[in-house]
Amino acid sequence: MKTLASLLTATALTATSAQAVDLEVTHWWTSGGEAAAVAEFAKAFTEGTDNTWVDGAIAGGGGTARPVMISRITGGDPMGATQFNHGQQALELVEAGLMLDLTDVAEAEGWKDLVNPSSLLDSCTVDGRIYCVPVNIHSPQWIWLSNGAYEKVGLPVPTNWDEFVASGPALREAGIVPLAMGNQAWQSNLAFDAMAVAIAGPDAWVDVVSNKNVELARGDVYAKVFQAAADARSLREGSNVQDWNQATNMVITGEAGGQIMGDWAQGEFAVAEKVAGEDYTCLPGLGVNEVISTGGDAFYFPKNDDPAIEAAQKELASVMMSKAVQVAFNLKKGSLPVRGDVDLSAANDCMKKGLAILAAGNILPGLDQSLSPDAVGQIEDLMTEFWASESITAEDAQSRYADIIESAG
């Protein structure tokens, strides 16, 4: 890592790379599994360069952290590096000239030949220049099931969404919450979106969120999605937790039968020393349509006038993309690496499922890659209301959802 300066053409980087820098990195990874994963970045950067990672974790998830991050950047108090999701979240900051151009690092290290799928790097690219380093592929279209809960009620572990719904009464009778879900807007939207991909199908989902097909969003196909979501509301009753990892813990302990959550849930199972296929079961695409999205996380580097800080920023970008760090980080995060040339023989059963789907090309764009932050926020608000109250019918929710898609188009 310390030889990065020799790979780059910038003379300022060559002149200042020996200066040690304390680089603040902001992110919203605070759960047990997330903390273990981000520690791999910190360790590699601090031990592999002359610099020091200064952790700037912000609790409360992306919805809480992003406004803080954006306010600091636009207010003249930038951090050294900051997390955003793949997509349009940082686009305005890039267009305002507030983010460091990483094209020299990307070209020197051949990122275009390494990153798979290419859409990940495309999300970092504005006007032909690269402004972020993608670090993982996270897919939200999973349901995680407690093998112990199903053993307790004497039922086989479901293999698809319909079987899971059918198991709800037996779980409830045994005092087990069928569906664990935290009370945060993004979790409500994630669950709905995963159901949309499973029930409407990947092609219909892409047509709605990417092509803004309002007729489809108002039609019979999506009516089935909203009715299924309405039916699932009763399954989450009793899931009185706030954070996603608390809901995951309900599955880990057998208090809940399942949870719709992204593959980052694997990190929590790993910290709890649970084994995929033995203690828990994972169903990509809710066991109906086995696809993964190319959502996930990327790091951006706000501009700074100090050449030494810029050198450290580029070194960190290189560290995050390196083979060893991609493996170490993603094995603990539960996500898939962005590099297509790394050895993941240590992957567990669930990660292997994701890798097989990726290799088969059964992928979707992430929601943040398809809709603006404003549109995503509006849908999250709607889903929060919908999941919380049966006073909002499936028909009403569908009509409001279609209105949002129409305005987004």
Image (cartoon, rainbow, N blue to C red):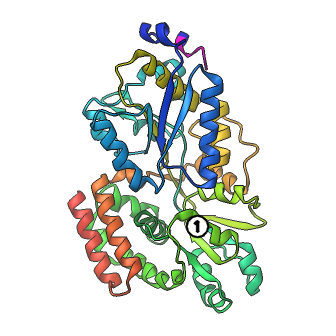
| Residue pictured at 61% horizontal, 59% vertical | 265
Looking at the rendering, which quadrant does residue 200 occupy?
Answer: bottom left
Where is mark 1, residue-wise?
246
Give the x, y percent position of residue 248: 61, 66
Q: Residue 296 versus residue 113: which sits nearer the camera?
A: 296
User: Which residue is at the front of the view, 294 or 362?
Assistant: 294
Query: Residue 21 at what x, y percent from top left?
Result: 51, 22
Evaluate whether residue 313 shows in this view.
yes
The mark total stands at 1
Viewed as shown, does residue 133 lie left or right of 178? left
Magenta span contains residue 295: no
Using the rendered view, name the quadrant where residue 70 is placed: top left
Using the rendered image of the protein, determine whether residue 341 is visible from the camera's viewpoint: no
| Residue 42, placed above or below residue 169 | above
- Tell me: residue 394, above or below residue 29: below
In this orientation, which residue lies closer to the viewer: 164 or 170? 170
Q: Which residues are magenta?
A: 1-5
* Residue 346 found in image quarter: top right
User: As drawn, is 49 to the left or to the right of 226?
Assistant: right
Residue at 79%, 66% in the rendered image:
278
Quarter of the image where the N terminus is located: top right
Q: Nearer the viewer, residue 127 or 48?
A: 48
- Is 409 situated above or below 75? below
